Image (cartoon, coloured by chain):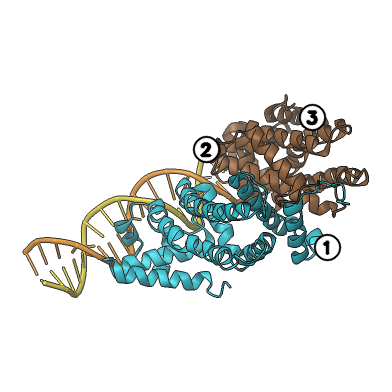
Chain colours: A cyan, B brown, C yellow, D orange
Amino acid sequence: MNESGFEEVLQTFLEEIKREDKMTEKQRRILEASIKLFAEKGFHASSTSEIAKEAGVAEGTIFRHYKSKKDILIAVVAPAITKIAVPYILKDVRKILADNNDRSFADVLARLYKNRLELIAANEKHFRILLQEAFFHEELRQALLYTVATEMKQLASQFVLQRIDAGELRPLPPEVIFRVIFSLILGLVTFKYTVGQEEYRMLDEDEQVALTMDILMNGIARRPEHE
Amino acid sequence: MNESGFEEVLQTFLEEIKREDKMTEKQRRILEASIKLFAEKGFHASSTSEIAKEAGVAEGTIFRHYKSKKDILIAVVAPAITKIAVPYILKDVRKILADNNDRSFADVLARLYKNRLELIAANEKHFRILLQEAFFHEELRQALLYTVATEMKQLASQFVLQRIDAGELRPLPPEVIFRVIFSLILGLVTFKYTVGQEEYRMLDEDEQVALTMDILMNGIARRPEHE
DNA sequence: GTCTATAACTCGATAGAC
DNA sequence: GTCTATCGAGTTATAGAC
């Protein structure tokens, strides 16, 4: 899974634009260069002169098409997020949830967790920048949240409800279950990329995921044995 | 709890410095102004001229004491984090873990969660900036992590081990339990401040905490009834 | 309080398409 | 000729630096 990296998806996106839009050649190159530079170094660290140079156009040309630098961001990067980043982020989730109806909930989730960790490891730099920019710019935050969060929640809730109906899970509010599942992956990622080095290596990643799944399914409370 | 806000703790810190340190009056004022401005608007948004103005010194004076703006950040703000922010963040945690030895684990945790949500709600702006700057500057990230994370983990692990020994919790690796507990509060906070408005209000905060505790203690798996 | 660099942004000149 | 996309030197502001 994740055979196609971010760059390839981006390429497809750019070809689509070329085909369908009535942009000039230069305008397309500005757009392309902006996405590239913003994704590489972030919005703030990319100057308009760099964008111009990368796109092979004069700096003035940029402002003929976009009235400010922020305009490039919201007019160009926000759609790119919803059209590139979001499908890319969700692609595997759909596949994993759809293809594994016969597996146990814990098993599906373990796959999902490992896949998320792989996805982030493979695109660490892009995630950093996306996170950083989302922190700064309300427009991008919304582009991300109202697509990724909403859709992921929907996918997960549906899956959870199925499993509740099947008697595999306790009948808890699905949005709470989703939040807990999401929290645990968020925590795994956070620990991996912050405290990371020292203690994270004490247990390997698979063990961390397995133990987390165990706690998610069974809780941490000791309970009286059955017999 | 949390009677004393961030500003008061800062004040105490500044008075201490005045008393004990052999800094010049101007140097102290630069430090004071830097912390104030960085905490208010963040590092990037605060210019050296603003700092100079706020401190009532010439801009040149700043560069006599610190060779660059980033120097101010790591030489002045990093210590301030470990001396102000960290004790402030940990204060209530200590109290809650120490004062509640007779209560159930779930009960203590629920108190802790509610307290953390209160702490963040009361200092939302400062947390935002701290998070943002930690994201950018390795030095601050370390100042935070290697004090907050380490100490909090130690406090929590100790508490968890007690409860494992007492037979209240399953004998799982305490660092994993800590990570899960931490993840869940991180998730609660993240949801509150992002997707927040819509669905978070469907269940009130106390209910969210209670359900999260329930899942943490008992898991989400349906199990055969005892009888 | 001056200096230098660099950021975002402007605008008159230009040149090829029709 | 005119129109429109383009160029790029120049403007203004503000940063950090000393």
Q: Say which residue label 1 marks.
A: A202
Q: Residue at x 50, y 71 (%)?
A: A7
Q: Chain of mark 3?
A: B
Q: Are the residues under badges 3 and 2 in a single subunit? A: yes
Q: Could you say where residue D1 lies in the image, as x and y percent from the top left?
A: 6, 64
Task: Compare residues A224 and B36 and report the one nearer the observer.
Answer: A224
Gap between marks 1 and 3 measured at Cα: 41 Å
Residue B93 coordinates in the image, percent (x, y): 79, 36
> With B172 as the anchor, is A98 left or right in this view?
left
Task: Say which residue label 2 marks.
Answer: B197
Instruction: Answer whether labels 1 and 3 touch (C-beta < 8 Å).
Output: no
Work out whether mark 3 precedes mark 2 in sequence or the reverse, and give the earlier one.
3
Amino acid on which disc 3 is placed: Glu
Q: Which residue is mark 3?
A: B16
Which element type, helix, strand or loop, lies under badge 3? helix
Q: Quadrant of the N terminus of chain B?
A: top right
